[in-house]
Every structure is written in structure tokens, then in C-alpha cells.
Amino acid sequence: MSWMALSKAMQLEKGGAIRDALASLWARLRCDRPRAPAPAHRTVAFTIAVTTLAAKMAKADGVASRIEAEAFERLFRIPAGEEKNVRRLYDLAKRDAAGYEAYATKIGKLLKDEPELLHSLLKCLFHIATVDGILHPQEDEFLDTVAQRFAISRTEFAAIRASFVHDPASPYEILGVRPDISDAELKARHRVLVRENHPDRLMASGIPVEFRAAVDRRLAAINVAYEMVLKERGLKPSVLEQRGT
């Protein structure tokens, strides 16, 4: 279903009941003041696109399960009073995965100046996709395409994917480095990743609090991968510290 068709079906076109309800919500939250444009991730268009993209991702493997819907609701906190509207949109969008590329492209454009938020959103989608313990090939392909529409590099995608797909042979992928990296470079890379993915920093930079679960999971995966590489090399964090590397 096209964006225009979905909007019409859901009464999201100008003057539609659901769009008016969501628009009123943002107004009450003072997110759409004329003199202070709303952040892209606080607009009606973003809410519609993310809800639809998450629902279609859940359907990518052919079955949109309740556990995936619950994961969506945990990650993307639904404002009080708007639960029925957002769930109705989610239920309509999850009927099939067709057309998801358009929504991914729309989000990519809305957040083109907020790459960290795009990364966090991709992590949230991975979280939903793997909440049942399995990443199906169709979901993998779906997320790969979304990453491309978000302008996320192949290396960055592989690192994020490795955080959710538990492959014991991929700690280097999680860290985004080559196996021949030196101990000193490894330590420096770990420090950068911890700093870039620290929940407090990301929350302070404007990442919505509802993304916290995916952020925490990413940082935990980074630390586990780092420890795996150190163990493989017969090292401990304290050893690198003592070497002053």
C-alpha cells in the first residue's frame, strides 16, 4: 500500500481524524511551535513512518507476532491517549511488508542530519526482529535495505548486526575492526566505541529515551566482543593498561 493510500485509509491525510489527534498531541507537548520547528523525530510524519516501518519489519518473515508488537511498544513509548491510533496504524501496516523501502527512505530524509538517531533506530528494529530469538533471512534482507536507505555504511551495518546476531566468530565485526589490528589500536577503538555508544551521551544528544534498551544492548555487545578478543589474545584489560597502550 502506498504512503498516500495508507494515509487515506488511516485518515492521516490533512483533516483526517488520526492525523488531527496526533497533531494535537504534538501541539500539547509544544513540539510544533512555529518559531521552534519540531525535531524530526517528534513530528507526525516520523511517528507514522516509524510505526509503519516497524510493523512491516515484523511481517518480513511472514508472521507478525505479538511478541514483536510488544517489543515495539516497549521501545517506542506510545503517548497516553494515543494508544488506539498508533496500534491501529501498526495493525494495518503489518498486513504485509510491501512498500517498506519508501518509509525507510522517508525516515532517512527526515533524519539526514541526525545520523546517531538513524543508527539507534536501526538498532531498535534489530531488537524487534530478534526478540523471538531468531533473525530470519527475510528480516535480515529487510534490515540491510533499511540501512542502505538510512545511508549507514556496510561496516557500520555489520557491526550493529553482529550485536544482535550471536555469532561467536564475529567479535571483530562487532567492533568494526580487522583481526590483525594491534593491541594498542584495539584498545583505542574500544574506547571510541564506548564513548560513542554510552547511553548517557546518546540520551544527552537527543536520542529518545525509548531507544534506551537498544542502546544498552549495543554497548553490552561491544564490551563482550572486546573481552572475547582480549581472551583470544591471552590478554586482560589490566594488561593493556599496564603497558600504557
Image (cartoon, grey):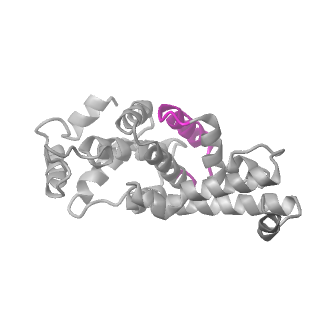
Q: How many marks?
A: 0
Residue at 33% in and 47% down: 41
In this rendering, would 231 be left or right of 33?
right
Q: Does residue 152 appear in the picture of this structure?
A: yes
Q: Quadrant of residue 72?
A: bottom left
Please determine whether, in this image, residue 70 is positioned above or below residue 62: below
Horizontal and vertical percent position of residue 77: 34, 61
In this rendering, would 223 be left or right of 35?
right
Residue found at the very far right of the displayed protein:
234
Q: Which residues are magenta?
A: 129-152
Please determine whether, in this image, residue 191 is positioned above or below residue 1: below
| 227 falls in the magenta region | no
Horizontal and vertical percent position of residue 117: 43, 47
| 138 falls in the magenta region | yes
Please determine whether, in this image, residue 144 is positioned above or below residue 197: above
For the N terminus, the image quarter is top left
Front residue of this view, candidates 220 and 239: 239
In this rendering, would 192 be left or right of 57?
right
